[in-house]
Image (cartoon, helix red, strand yellow):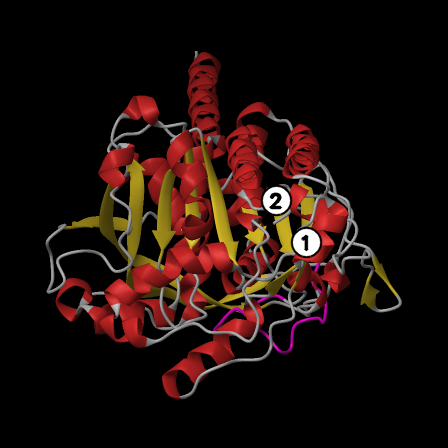
Amino acid sequence: MPTQIDSRVMLRLLILWLASLTVLLSPSSHADALVAQPLLTPIPDNAGLKQRPFISSILDLSQYGYVEREFQMSGTANLYDADGRWRSDGLWNTTIAQADVPYATRLLVRRPADPQQFNGIVVVEWLNNTAFMDVDVIWAQSHDELLREGYAWIGVSAQFFGVTMLKSWDRERYGELSLPNDGVSYDLFSQAANAVRNQSALLLDGLPVKGIIGAGESQSAIRLTTYVNAFQAQAVQMYDAILLYSRFALAAPLKAGISLVSPSRVYIRPDNRLKILQFETEQDIFMFLFRLARQADTEYLRSWELPGASHYDAYGVGNLLPQYQRDFPALSTIQLVCRNSLNQIPQHYVVNAALSAMSQWITGGEPPPQSDRIEYRNWKVVRDEHGNALGGIRLPHLEVPTATHNYANYGVIGSGGNFLVNSFACPFLGNSVPFDQKKLAALYSSHEEYVARFTAAAGVALEQGFLLPADFAAAVAEAQAAQVPW
């Protein structure tokens, strides 16, 4: 009899152990073990003196069937130190320097109002802080794709300067926000995704989530490079894919700023198991030295390179500048006047294609297409007879050119505030130098020839997966409307 009782007890213990093991291995429970669950508090639309969010969309989102909401996200996060030496291979470890540091920040949400419109993918953008405030760079570039395909988008105020500016801009609305320093940013970014996965009823009004893309541009991409290398376990649990848009060769430190003591080149760690797409412009690759961190594509890594493109461009500025002139009326008198005209290569078309490809990668398992590398020889970019770079993703604007496109825009015009703004911004915005009438006439015998050649080149980019159908149509329409040749 005792043996029989012992056997029953053992059987029950075994069942309980198996049940607990199942819970521990389930994605949400394991994620909770790695990443704390934050507290979400809706911020009323009419809260504060401004009665709207900082960088609320300049678009009438209701016309697209979208709503914009804002939340305070609060909880605790850890500060970290490096554990051992960080080398170029990205196999980085961390140790907790200070645990359970209180924080409060904000999430800005733009999502479809109708669940039937939602495509199931949430893009969580690490808002850029290079201008010492939150900048929704990826939304500015890819809002067309996000809106037409029904993505949800969430901007995360992950860094100290962004939160400081929020409180300065509207202390009544954002007065409770507090970040000790950028060291908590990595846990914050994980907790934002955790909120998407486990609190979608509140955050997204119950939209059914199929996948989450983490995304960041420039400084944000640099910090995300550290995130995927040093916090791989969190990143894999929380995100289905990461878009690193215009990252440099370096990575960010565990505290603030851009690391000056990290390796001179930083690769994505070889044991990475997170779907990552790196999108790099010509300026990123050569001026910002990403060429030193080039690595071969793998099952989990794709790298796209766009020749002719600058770090940022005329399209992005055209979307961001009105937004900030509205939020800071003093900026309305400041003109962005660079020595050369701003870069006109439509990198937003390729960012759109990247988001689309990553969504399909998540939902269908098919990785994005592979991109050729921009040609580089004898410490210089290899250029064609028009001065445009060879290799990389070949948009029709390069294959059937009407201008020379590059990133050399170092001269500025203006004085006072204009000079300061232009000195900071112009070097990142490249230039496009249009061909004169004589050269256009020599290249294209008629407008019809130009449009036909442009359309054919756009068709190749479409077939390769670097141009989406809607952007193909927009590009061809632009070519048809262009006065080429004059």
* Residue denoted by label 1: 268
Q: What numbered label is drawn on residue 201?
A: none
Reply above or below: 329 against 106. Answer: below
- Badge 2 element: strand
Disc 2 residue crowd, few under 14, some 14–19, many 20+, Cα 10 Å: many
**N-term mark: 2 or 1:** 1
Q: What numbered label is drawn on residue 276?
A: 2
Q: Are marks 2 and 1 in contact (CB under 8 Å)?
A: yes
- Amino acid carrying label 2: it is Ile
Reply above or below: 232 against 474. Answer: below
- Amino acid carrying label 1: it is Ile
User: Residue 89, located in which quarter of the rendered image?
Assistant: bottom right
Reply above or below: 166 against 6. Answer: below
Span of residues in magenta: 251-271
In the drawing, does residue 192 fall left or right of residue 85? left
State the separation of the CA atoms marked 2 and 1. Answer: 9 Å
Seen from the viewer's position, the closer of residues 453 and 260 is 453
Task: In the displayed orientation, state which residue is furthest to the right.
Answer: 378
Q: Position of residue 333 (x, y in %)?
A: 30, 75
